[in-house]
Image: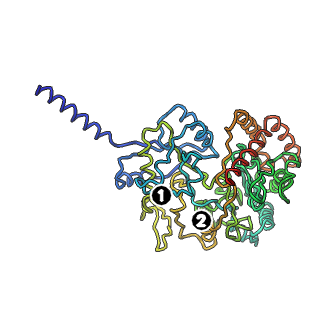
Amino acid sequence: MKKILAIVLALVLCMSMMVTASAETELKIYLFGQAQNMDKVLEKFYAESGLDIKLNIVWNTGADHREKLPLLIGNEEDCDLTFDAYWMNMATMIKQDMYADLSSYFYNDEYPGIKAAFSESFMAQVTDETGAIYAIPFTQAANDIQTIFYRADLAEKYGITIDSLESLEAYFKAVKENETDMIAPFGIGGSRAMYYLELDTLEKRQQNVFEINGSGTAVGMEFEVAISEDNKTVLGAASIGMPEEDFANFPAPFNTNTRSERAINRLTKWAQYTQPNSVSEEDALNNLFYTGLVAAVEGNISGYENAKREIEKIEGAKLGVYVYLDGLRNQEPGYYITTGQTAWNFLCVPYYCKNIDAAMKFIDWIFQSPENHDLFELGIEGEDFVLNEKGEYTKLAPANLYTFPGYEMTWNPNFIRTNAELDDEIKSIVNYMNNPASYSPSVLDGFVFDTQATPELVNAYAAVSAIQSEYIRPLMHGAYGAETEAKLQEYWTKAEAAGARVIQQAIIDQVQAFLDAKNK
């Protein structure tokens, strides 16, 4: 018996040692893009966090991540956290029960970092009618201010102050006529191309006309919905290419097809200043603007710091910023009316994840203190950045400078630091963007279009999206020129036959149901 007991005790001790040795949890995290010099940040995290957690981050391109994610989760491959978004696969994945309900980790004293960073009002955008939460939202502001980045040194050279669309065009003309080493004044790329230029979505929101994100795969070809002044009734829904009568009940001056008009008259006008074969360009910012081949690109104010750093690598080059919506440029309080989701980027946990507690403990740690958050967003203090007495940061320039796409894991309205080195004009724009008083709520806040509501809608959505993909690039690039109107008619004929009217009716029905529920 003594021998048996000794053997049993030895086995118990051995098993205990094995459990102790394997207590460390590896979290496999799927993101897109790339961080730089992250190893040093991870080493500091491992040394100071007190968590028995190691991170294994898998980086893909955005396109690969979007394509591979459904298969990865469907096959139940190792994954503890993954980036997703409504503009990727998130709506479909949630509908298919691919993500775990995380609601028990929010508003929970055992997760003080999450509780402090993610309020109930902020989480309303991802909380369904049952109280389930399938995604963690990341954003700093309700909107990223839309801009044109341009070569300020060239604007000075030609004596042009860019403060209107007319002066922007004068700048483009001067560059086109004189900068013979450049391939074009204005570089565009991808399917978005000229996405912001003369886009009237914010003006429309003032009149209760809202774009419905997720009503097609093509950004710029979404449906729009008009709602009555009393916020109770859907007046209509319509999209680019559709007949004028579909817009008849929209409020003036938007009771005609303004989406088509923009494509026919405005994008084709600006196309004369874009590079040849723009339709095949994927990344105008990195491939054309930073290399000195074009004099301007579209951008967002959140990208200013990187753009300034990159453009100044060109001898004598300086970065200029033009905010081309009057209300934003004039920083009018409450001008930006929100709609739908206020965050565009999310982390999700697969439904089969065995390390969900550890994954949420990691997220909780990031938001337990500004110091923890700064480590992952900015790097090592004193090496990658320093803070001034106002809490503003200055990036340093070590050979192993840390960079990380914060919108995938660290952006949060309660953890925003301003770059101390921004000039007064840019700092003013950034502070306006981050100020809650700059935004006004809309009747559609919290609405998400369910593309999976019925089998008929699923089929129509897939078919119309495929047709849109044939036309989106030439349209947004203004590349059809004088044939644009005919091409739009051709597009709509195909889209209508493929089920666009099914999507239209589903939008009307879902928005009306959403309004009815709010007005009970």
The residue lying at 70 percent from left, 33 percent from top is 455
Counting from the top left corner in percent of width and height, residue 298 is at 70, 57
Amino acid of disc 1: Leu
Counting from the top left corner in percent of width and height, residue 58 is at 49, 42
| Label drawn at residue 352 | none
Label 1 Cα crowd, 10 Å radius (few <14 / some 14-19 / many 20+)? some
The residue lying at 49 percent from left, 34 percent from top is 77
Counting from the top left corner in percent of width and height, residue 161 is at 74, 71
Q: In the image shown, does 336 or 266 lie closer to the viewer?
A: 336
Q: Is residue 148 left or right of residue 266?
A: left
Q: Secondary structure at mark 2?
A: helix
Q: In the image shown, does 423 or 107 lie closer to the viewer?
A: 107
| Label drawn at residue 434 | 2
Give above or below for 459 relative to 118.
above
Q: Secondary structure at mark 1?
A: loop
The residue lying at 43 percent from left, 38 percent from top is 354
The residue lying at 45 percent from left, 57 percent from top is 367
Q: In the image shown, does 234 or 177 lie closer to the viewer?
A: 234
Q: What residue does disc 1 label?
A: 401
Q: Is residue 184 left or right of residue 485?
A: left
Q: Nearer the viewer, mark 2 or mark 1?
A: 2
Quadrant for the N terminus in the image: top left
Q: Quadrant of residue 92?
A: top right
Q: In the image shown, does 130 or 168 lie closer to the viewer?
A: 130
Instruction: Specify the farthest residue to the front.
Output: 520
